[in-house]
Amino acid sequence: MESSFYNKNIIYFFAALFLFGCEMKRVSGDPSLSSSTNNDNNGSGVNNTELPAGFSNFISEYTDVYISGDYVVVESTGVPNHPSPYWGEGHSNYITPHSGMVVNPNKISQQNYKFYIPLIPSVSSSVSSTPLGPIGVSISGVPFFNQYAGPNNQPLDNEIASFDNYDGHPQQSGQYHYHWEPKYLTSNGASSMLIGYSLDGFPVYGPTEQATGQFPSDLDELNGHSHATNEYNDGTYHYHATTNSPYLIGGFKGNYGSLNGGGYFTN
């Protein structure tokens, strides 16, 4: 009896050990359980639970950043992380307009953005023109708009007077945005810092180079070029903010739009 009881206990012990080992193997092999990063693979083929280095620059107080399938998703309410007359009088972030500012009638309102940025951007076979509305997102969650004020490539000149202290303003539905360098970010960081991402997945930097502190002299017509940066040691194509049109992104070097396998946004 004692021998039979002993043998049974040995069998139970090893069976339990085997099951425990199988369970540990399942958990350690499941990316959604082995990483704190939200990863919804959706059967898309990308199995990467780590965000690309540049996405750690997003300001967590204003954005939620995670991987979903082939995309890095940036969720944001789109409100700026700085004062502006466009908050409206009585708001804690309201400031009076600066001298010469022509305040437009719109007020900042919260949005429900989800920017889908390609996890692994690639150069497209042809350049896509930037549309009106968001063409990228800053690290504070405020969208980038292109160099035009309206349909048919209306010049931005007539809108510049309505920019606040940090060169942003809201449009009719309250979408606050930047056409230019987001000055609040670069004045509190560095003029060479990563300021956001284009919807095609390529990063956007401030007006100067990280390595030299100088303005780049070899930008293409889209405001971009390729080399290594602090966030991309092996090099990548990227855009720079400039004081002349197109200011941020002159066109999409990479794939744009969900039907083309590129980036897009919802609101």
Image (tube, grey):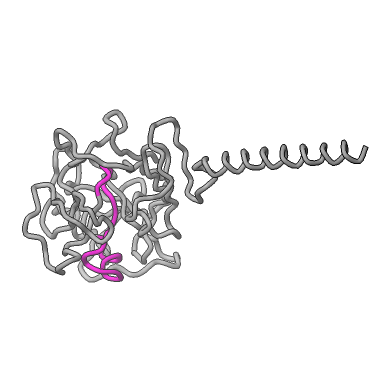
Q: Quadrant of the C terminus?
A: top left
Q: Quadrant of residue 242?
A: bottom left
Camera-side residue: 91 or 31? 31
Q: Residue furthest left?
A: 217
Residue at x 14%, y 34% (from the top left corner): 126
Residue at x 87%, y 36% (from the top left corner): 4
Position of residue 111 measured from the top left corner of the image (x, y, whole percent): 41, 47
Position of residue 163 measured from the top left corner of the image (x, y, whole percent): 24, 60
User: In this picture, is 210 found above or below 47?
Assistant: below
Camera-side residue: 80 or 4? 4
User: In this picture, is 176 found above or below 32?
Assistant: below
Residue at x 29%, y 45% (from the top left corner): 134
Camera-side residue: 112 or 222? 222
Position of residue 152 measured from the top left corner of the image (x, y, whole percent): 14, 38
Number of residue marks: 0
In this picture, which residue range is highlighted in magenta?
A: 182-202
Q: Quadrant of residue 105?
A: bottom left
Residue at x 52%, y 40% (from the top left corner): 30
Q: Quadrant of residue 227?
A: bottom left
